[in-house]
Amino acid sequence: MIEKKQKCISINYIRIIVALLILVPFVFPFLFKLFHWYIPGIHPFLDLKGRLSHIEANSLGINTYIEANPLDPLNRINNKPSISLLLSHTGIGVSDSNWIGWILVSTFLIQSISLLRKCDLKLIIACSFCILTPNTLFALERGNDDLIVFILAFAIPYLLNSLTRYSISIVSFIVVILGSLKYYPFTLFSVLWSDDLHKLSQNFRRYVLPFIIIIWIIIFGKEMILLKSNLPLNPPGLSGFNISDVSAINKIVRDGTITHKSKSLNFLYKETVGRNIDNKSLEYWLRELKNEQTTLRKIKRSIISTKEYQDRLAAVRANPSITEAELDRLDSAYKDKDNKNFVDEVEKNKKSLNLNDFIKEKIPLLILYISFFFSLTLILKYLNKDKSNISEEIYLKTNRLDRLFYIMGASMLVFCYLTSGNNSYRMIHSIFTIPLITSLIKSPFKNPKQNKYRKGAISLLILILLSNWMVLIQSIPIIYPNFQGSLYIIDSIKIVTDYCLFSLLGAFAFLLIIRSFSFKINQIKSQE
């Protein structure tokens, strides 16, 4: 009894330490300067301010989908779904960003550290560093929408664990709301296939769920496709994750990835000036990067210090209702009409693709999908080699909540990895996988053959740590400028790490669903 109390006290101490360490950069903001995504003068909660400014501008009659938002800190055109506009009549706006942001941060911290489980000191320290990561700080500093997804999704396993008549209806409501806020949370419906659900849930999956999905597609599908096409390109490698990044490895190693740098620069312009990069600027910065005369961090500072940026910012502060057309008439605004926009040029090239070009473009992606599912199948075969009585023991070693949390986090991450480019802050959902990983690592298996589950869980933990912490390497050029040229090799390592991570994440999630069904079948047979 005394030992249990001591363990409980020690785990709570570690939870408090993790939460406090995450809050340190907020107390000492200069620490955020170590990260490549930090934008001076706009701290904290940039993404939250963007969302709130969208709501506030709509209440003032400004259409931020077609003109720059004068209330946005970076004067950006909105690329967020319209569901948040339902809050336009509440009167909330950019001035409310601090108290809303701190509610999100504190709620996220309480929820995430609660997922740390009792185990030996080495394991709990390793799991703590899966929460205390640069990606977590990125999400918190920006006040990103992914925090809202994490906070609301956190309730789903507890609701399903209760297995009450109304729990599935509440879960469906949460998933539909989150799916309207960000498309990928719709994969949260996968948890309905993951555990011992009664007849009501089976009927729900067969009849109600398809109806919900169809209605959602009719209402929000077109908007999601349109917004997704207008999103800025996410740079591959350290700054994000996407299966298509694998095809960029050859270019990264061969020529320092011109495509990679171009996407990064365009993303940078979108984040700061609010427009796509022009060809003259693109050529200039590519030349500077190639000659190792600058870094992306220095370029960001240069853009913010330009007359174009400063004049736009001053004009918006002087007249918050100023339109994009009026901003474009400023003397310092970019007006080189003979020079095509970077993304316009890309779109033009896409339209001019003939069938052969289309095939050449899509075949590599198709090969990547095939190789991913082949890798996933090989891992599944290895983990599922011995079928007899292992399902029962796996379920005895883990609990329902941990399994639900894992499937929830893994399904969102794998879906995002396969379908689109993602910023690194989305890796906060890997925190959901920690409880099950901890249970599999610390649980002693009677059958030595079952140690492969433990080895797989250890591999997952290592890969999650690598994927979350490798992004910190982007800060090295601040101290050692000559390291900039080596980043592209690290990018390649990160891309391979992500491929292994998401293959293993998907395999374990799929295995849990399969074993859930097989375990229930075995239970039914034993009862008969």
Image (tube, rainbow, N blue to C red):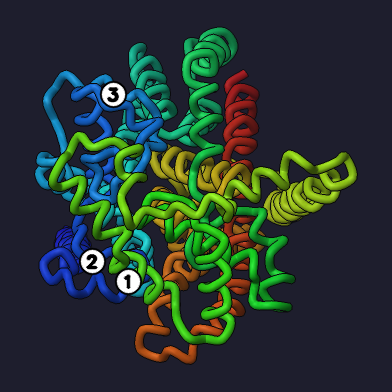
Which disc is residue 85 wearing? 3
Q: Position of residue 270 (x, y in %)?
A: 42, 53
Label 1 or label 2, whichever comes before in sequence order = 2
Residue 386 against residue 91 in the figure, above or below: below
Question: Looking at numbered disc 1 in the image, what kind of residue is underneath it?
Answer: Arg
Q: Residues within 10 Å of mark 3 (few under 14, many from 20)?
A: some
Q: CA gap, disc 1 to disc 2?
A: 8 Å
Q: Nearer the viewer, mark 3 or mark 1?
A: 1
User: What residue lies at 27% left-to-right and 52% top-to-bottom?
Assistant: 312
Residue labelled with disc 2: 40
Q: Is residue 302 visible?
A: yes
Residue 222 against residue 65 in the figure, above or below: above
Q: Position of residue 443 (x, y in %)?
A: 46, 59
Q: Secondary structure at mark 1?
A: helix
Q: Nearer the viewer, mark 1 or mark 2?
A: 1
User: What residue lies at 25% left-to-right and 43% top-to-bottom?
Assistant: 72
- CB-based contact (under 8 Å), mark 1 and mark 2: yes
Label 2 or label 3, whichever comes before in sequence order = 2
Q: CA gap, disc 2 to disc 3?
A: 29 Å
Image label count: 3
Q: CA gap, disc 3 to disc 1?
A: 33 Å
Question: Looking at numbered disc 2 in the image, what kind of residue is underneath it?
Answer: Pro
Residue labelled with disc 1: 301
Q: Secondary structure at mark 3?
A: helix
- Residue furthest to the right: 356
Question: Looking at numbered disc 3 in the image, what kind of residue is underneath it?
Answer: Leu
- Between 341 and 450, the residue placed more toward the observer is 341
Label 3 or label 1, whichever comes before in sequence order = 3
User: What residue lies at 34% left-to-right and 19% top-to-bottom?
Assistant: 170
